[in-house]
Amino acid sequence: MRSSLLAVMRRRTTLMVASAGLATACAASAVAVALPEENAVAAPVAVAVGTPAPAVAVEQPAVAAVEQPAVQPKQEEESPAVASRSEQRSELSAATVGTSPSAVRELARSIVPAAQYAAFSRIISHESGWNFKATNASSGAYGLAQALPGSKMASAGADWRTNPATQIKWALDYMNSRYGSPNAAWSFWQSHHWY
């Protein structure tokens, strides 16, 4: 047991080393340095409490000083742009609380431009009846706009399965990018009965 204890002490012996730069500033400042096994010392070096640690030269790699930026205290007031974005987010989440077809229609009315809303509404009425969870059993199309596959709507938000606002934004973007506007998409729908 004693021989194994000595072996452990030889491998794990540490020295109290005072940094040359800190020795002057704080004589009691000490750093524990683990020695590799081949440099192990037979017995630990003891330093009495309250006495300055002996300065021992230890070769260390040069480290460039990194200047830390000053930490600015958090300001209580938000900038107007940040405040308006957070207000929009809270309004949007409050608006998505109602998920009935009439609540979803009202939500769409607040997102879709007024001049495009009638056409947008007609398409959504035909595609899903304003049911944001509508699923086409044969094709797998999903949501208000019957996106195929439904996962396409992830480009508008990760909550595309459960958030009508995300689906409305995706549908509006789809109609604008593919047809130029919901009005043009409705014209196409009337001719083809799909869009």
Image (cartoon, grey):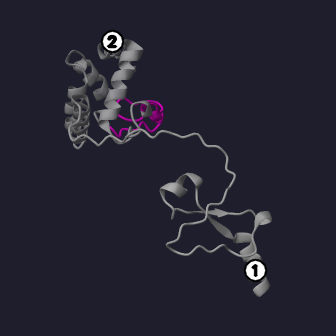
Q: Label 1 is placed on what type of residue?
A: Leu
Q: Is residue 43 above or below residue 176?
A: below
Find residue 189 and report its image quarter. Answer: top left
Find residue 195 and report its image quarter. Answer: top left
Q: Position of residue 70 (x, y in %)?
A: 38, 40
For the residue pair 160 and 139, the one nearer the viewer reads as 160
**Residue 68 falls inside the magenta stretch:** no
Residue at image x 76%, y 74%? 42
Looking at marks 1 and 2 on the same chain, the residue that comes earlier in the sequence is marked by 1
> Which SS type dominates the magenta stretch?
loop
Residue at image x 30%, y 36%? 164
Residue at disc 1, secondary structure: helix
For the residue pair 46 and 77, the one nearer the viewer reads as 46
Residue 141 shows in the view: no
**Residue 147 falls inside the magenta stretch:** yes
Magenta range is 132-153
